[in-house]
């Protein structure tokens, strides 16, 4: 009970970027007491309370196997919760998977166009939006390349562009930079937060990396493992856009330290 | 590291990841055949001809030499004599037509059946056993039945082809469709893609490399099917299989050897053709293009 009340105050505090009551009510994504049991008997999530306000960037950190990815599958409607309610704008979701998941036979442009193509958007319009999305991720001039001709980082950019082109109100990112090397990873973080600052979507970002979470998010949610539940929530007060050197700011380090401590506490 | 510190995040300068321009990777490294690389197969060919001569002149007594005529005799009697070669080429052309028609039918039917099987588990469970039976039943055992049902001409030859070539098409297409990455499926589910666009834009393109693997196997098999068909269904114009049987019965061993060589070369050519087609169709994006 104490956990819950703490969480609620933190959640209310976290959502008040501009402090208004209706901002909290008007959440883009809302998990209320969400449980997820699988048919094999494992419990992935239990009693998850989570809110993402419009334009809010929420990062979720937690140990492996704490159901972080399940959270995204529920938010996108790919899976259904077994208990509680999920309020999500399922028709306006951009999903970025752990892998770029590009169709290898399609060019970069055709890959980015895919969501609009499946939605039946007119050719001229989807082309225009795809080109705009590619511009946004810095891949102008690569439209005609095939995925296998690109580096891992560039493929992930294409994947970002594909999710962006649907102009989602909610962005779901499942450890998108986990497979990249450190240099590329840092650069992609900077790119992503630049795009976030430019477009202002709401985001739920899953990651293993505390520093990645602090650098990108306006709020960080810590989860514990088996069964997965939310144990703490931290505000990250730095305004967007954030410069790369923010990573060396003492305040940045302090927040990262607190989140890490909460993460250790939760996994024990 | 210093680059990251100096790159202000609010300066929206798109940075293409590695400095290596991706354009240079457009052309996959082409394997050039060096003269030295040709020496080994030529050497093995020479050795094979040598063994052939040895068998003819060292192993066989003159009275039995007709069983394996020497290579030069096959060359002069059959290949260089137009009156011998011409009927063989004509027969080969007919067999090629049978094989091609059979392969076309087997491909269309095989892909269709595989797609149906991939739609529903119960369909797969009820159809797959018959596909396996098709593969395992000795074709010679059902030849009489085919003759009774479809006559003893072109149609029956094609039927034999289809029966032999069908299974690899079904099995490979089904495997390709079932191997589609589940996150790719998620991607289509998120966009509420219809079953039809999922099939057309995801499953069939993803299965294409497997389909071509099946096509390569089936193309070879349909040549075999056509030759076997020729041997049993002899009405109408003779195919190369018909001629093989005729040469055998007349003890025309030079012609028999020549016809066997022609049929084999044709099989190799068909296989090479479909390897090439596969490379042109999926080589640009599929990893099989990296294989020699």
Image (cartoon, rainbow, N blue to C red):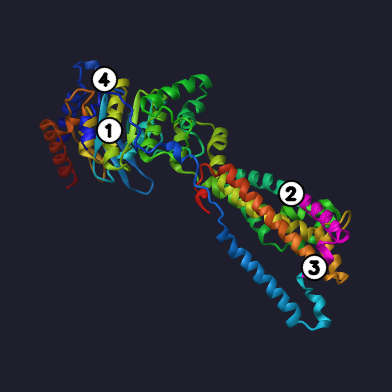
Specify whether A77 is left or right of A239: right
Tell me the distance, in whole angstroms, between the alpha carbons under discs 1 and 3: 73 Å
Question: Mark 4 or mark 3: which is in front?
Answer: 3
Residue A84 point in image, percent of width and height? 31, 33
> Residue A19 lies in what quarter of the image?
top left
* Mark 4 crowdedness (10 Å alpha carbons): few <14, some 14-19, many ≥20: few
Question: Mark 2 or mark 4: which is in front?
Answer: 2
* Mark 3 crowdedness (10 Å alpha carbons): few <14, some 14-19, many ≥20: some
Magenta region = B72-98
Residue A220 point in image, percent of width and height? 21, 32
Does residue A234 show up?
no
Q: Identify residue for label 1.
A: A189
Which residue lies at the image location 89% right of the left edge and 54% below the top edge?
B236
Query: Looking at this view, is A131 or A38 the one in front?
Result: A131
Chain containing the residue with disc 3 = B
Q: In the figure, B7 relative to B36: above or below?
A: above
Q: Main secondary structure of the magenta part?
A: helix
Tell me, yes or no, whether dots 1 and 4 are on the same chain: yes
Tell me the distance, in whole angstroms, between the alpha carbons under discs 1 and 2: 55 Å
Tell me the distance, in whole angstroms, between the alpha carbons under discs 2 and 4: 68 Å
- Mark number displayed over residue B74: 3
Q: Identify residue for label 4.
A: A25
Quadrant containing the N terminus of chain B in the rendered view: top left
Residue B136 point in image, percent of width and height? 66, 62
Query: Looking at this view, is B104 or B64 the one in front?
Result: B64
Tell me the distance, in whole angstroms, between the alpha carbons under discs 1 and 4: 29 Å
Number of disc labels: 4
Chain containing the residue with disc 2 = B
- Mark number displayed over residue B100: 2
Chain containing the residue with disc 4 = A
Tell me the distance, in whole angstroms, between the alpha carbons under discs 3 and 2: 28 Å
Specify whether A91 is left or right of A12: right
């Amino acid at each position: 009970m104490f956990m819950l009340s703490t969480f609620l105050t933190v959640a209310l505090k976290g959502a008040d970027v501009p402090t208004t009551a209706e901002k909290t009510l008007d959440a883009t994504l809302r998990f209320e007491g969400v449980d997820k049991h699988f048919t094999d008997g494992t419990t992935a999530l239990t009693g998850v309370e989570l809110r993402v306000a419009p334009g809010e960037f929420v990062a979720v950190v937690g140990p492996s196997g704490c159901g972080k990815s399940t959270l995204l599958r529920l938010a996108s409607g790919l899976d259904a919760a077994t208990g509680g309610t999920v309020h999500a704008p399922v028709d306006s979701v951009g999903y970025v998977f752990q892998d770029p998941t590009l169709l290898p036979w399609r060019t970069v442009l055709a890959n980015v166009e895919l969501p609009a193509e499946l939605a039946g958007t007119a050719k001229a319009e989807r082309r225009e939006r795809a080109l705009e999305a590619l511009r946004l991720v810095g891949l102008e001039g690569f439209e005609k390349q095939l995925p296998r001709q690109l580096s891992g980082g560039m493929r992930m950019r294409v994947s970002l562009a594909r999710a962006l082109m649907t102009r989602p109100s909610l962005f779901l990112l499942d450890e998108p930079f986990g497979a990249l090397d450190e240099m590329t990873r840092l650069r992609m973080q900077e790119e992503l937060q630049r795009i976030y600052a430019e477009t202002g979507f709401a985001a739920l970002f899953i990651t293993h990396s505390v520093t990645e979470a602090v650098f990108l998010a306006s709020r960080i949610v810590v989860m514990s493992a088996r069964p997965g539940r939310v144990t703490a929530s931290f505000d990250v007060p730095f305004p967007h856009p954030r410069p790369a050197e923010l990573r060396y700011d003492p305040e940045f380090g302090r927040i990262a330290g607190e989140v890490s401590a909460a993460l250790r506490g939760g996994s024990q | 590291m210093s680059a990251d510190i100096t790159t202000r995040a609010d300066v929206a300068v798109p940075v293409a990841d590695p400095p290596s321009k991706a354009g240079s990777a457009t052309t996959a490294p082409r394997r050039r055949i060096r003269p030295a690389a040709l020496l080994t197969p030529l050497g093995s060919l020479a050795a094979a001809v040598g063994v052939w001569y040895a068998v003819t002149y060292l192993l066989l007594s003159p009275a039995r030499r007709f069983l394996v005529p020497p290579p030069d005799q096959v060359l002069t009697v059959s290949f260089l004599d137009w009156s011998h070669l011409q009927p063989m080429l004509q027969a080969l052309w007919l067999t090629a037509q049978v094989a091609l028609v059979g392969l076309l039918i087997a491909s269309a039917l095989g892909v269709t059946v595989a797609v149906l099987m991939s739609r529903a588990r119960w369909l797969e469970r009820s159809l797959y056993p018959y596909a396996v039976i098709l593969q395992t039943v000795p074709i010679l055992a059902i030849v009489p039945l085919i003759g009774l049902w479809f006559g003893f001409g072109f149609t029956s030859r094609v039927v034999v082809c289809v029966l032999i070539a069908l299974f690899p098409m079904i099995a490979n297409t089904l495997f390709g469709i079932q191997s589609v990455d589940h996150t790719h499926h998620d991607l289509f589910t998120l966009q509420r893609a219809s079953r039809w666009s999922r099939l057309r834009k995801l499953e069939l393109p993803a299965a294409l490399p497997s389909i071509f693997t099946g096509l390569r196997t089936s193309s070879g098999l349909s040549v075999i099917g056509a030759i076997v068909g020729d041997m049993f269904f002899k009405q109408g114009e003779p195919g190369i299989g018909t001629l093989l049987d005729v040469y055998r019965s007349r003890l025309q061993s030079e012609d028999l050897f020549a016809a066997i060589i022609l049929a084999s070369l044709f099989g190799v050519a068909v296989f090479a053709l479909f390897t090439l087609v596969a490379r042109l169709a999926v080589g640009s994006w599929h990893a099989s293009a990296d294989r020699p």
